[in-house]
Image (spheres, rainbow, N blue to C red):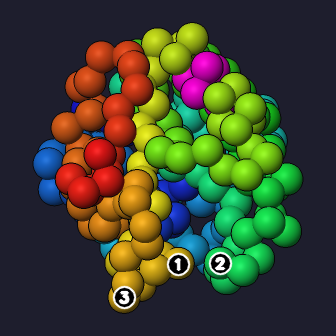
Amino acid sequence: MRVFVAGATGVIGIRLLPLLVGAGHEVAGMSRSAERTGPIETFGAEPVVCDVFDPAALAEAVEGFRPDLVMHQLTDLPDEVDRISEHSERNNRIRTEGTRNLLAAAHAARATRFLAQSIAWTPPGGGEVVAEHERQVLAAGGVVVRYGQLYGPGTYYPTLAPPPPRIHVDDAARRTLPLLDAPSGVVMLVDEDGA
């Protein structure tokens, strides 16, 4: 399968690349920064530099790869957990305009599958944005993956697990792989104690 991963250098995306390539998929990994494409190439994926907020460039990039599946692993979050509220508008824009643009690019490229990350909890003041993001994906026949709070290396909780719902970031990536063939719907990925 040809898989286009938007958000390939994010905390889940960077773990998905070697899993996808290792499973025999042809993979393109998108990042908005040329400086961050090194790991994409290292894992054997084709690097794509593009901004999800540039619809024409995005459509060209996705169509050029001819994917069977487009995967939305985009977020706009700060490196420091105590600054999340400062980024809420930026992250909400990813979930609204970014999702809309990525769905349009996938449709133009005739991709038959779409998978998008979401969250397994309702963020303070952001529930409607998350719900609209999920509605867009489901209306297009895609799969919504609701991840618990991520913990492990590279996350906001590198050594201690947060309260449920939660999932180790490596487990989140591993459990995403079988969802490439999942029917349209919502899938919750959390640790067993967070169900």
Is the residue under label 2 in contact with that under label 1 (CB below 8 Å)? Answer: yes
| Mark 3 lies on residue | 159
Q: Which residues are magenta?
A: 133-137
In x, y percent, where is residue 166? 38, 60
| Mark 1 lies on residue | 156
Mark 3 or mark 2: name the one nearer the start of the chain. Answer: 2
Q: Amino acid at mark 3?
A: Thr
Q: CA distance from mark 3 to mark 1?
A: 9 Å
Quadrant that contains the N terminus? top left
Disc number placed over residue 81 in the picture, else none: 2
Does dot 1 land on a helix, a strand or a loop? loop
| Residue 43 visible to the viewer | yes
- Residue in view at x 28 percent, y 32 percent: 180
Q: CA distance from mark 1 to mark 2?
A: 6 Å
45 or 81, which is in the foreground?
Answer: 81
Q: Does the stretch in magenta take in 159?
A: no
Q: Amino acid at mark 2?
A: Val
In x, y percent, where is residue 185? 39, 19
| Residue 6 visible to the viewer | no
In x, y percent, where is residue 22? 16, 56
Mark 1 or mark 2: name the one nearer the start of the chain. Answer: 2
Is the residue under label 1 in contact with that under label 3 (CB below 8 Å)? Answer: no
Residue neighbourhood size for the residue with mark 1, other residues' Cα within 10 Å, grouped as few (<14), some (14–19), many (≥20): some
Q: Is residue 23 above or below residue 112?
A: below
Q: Main secondary structure of the magenta part?
A: helix
- Outermost residue to the left: 23
In x, y percent, where is residue 17? 33, 58
Q: CA distance from mark 3 to mark 2?
A: 14 Å
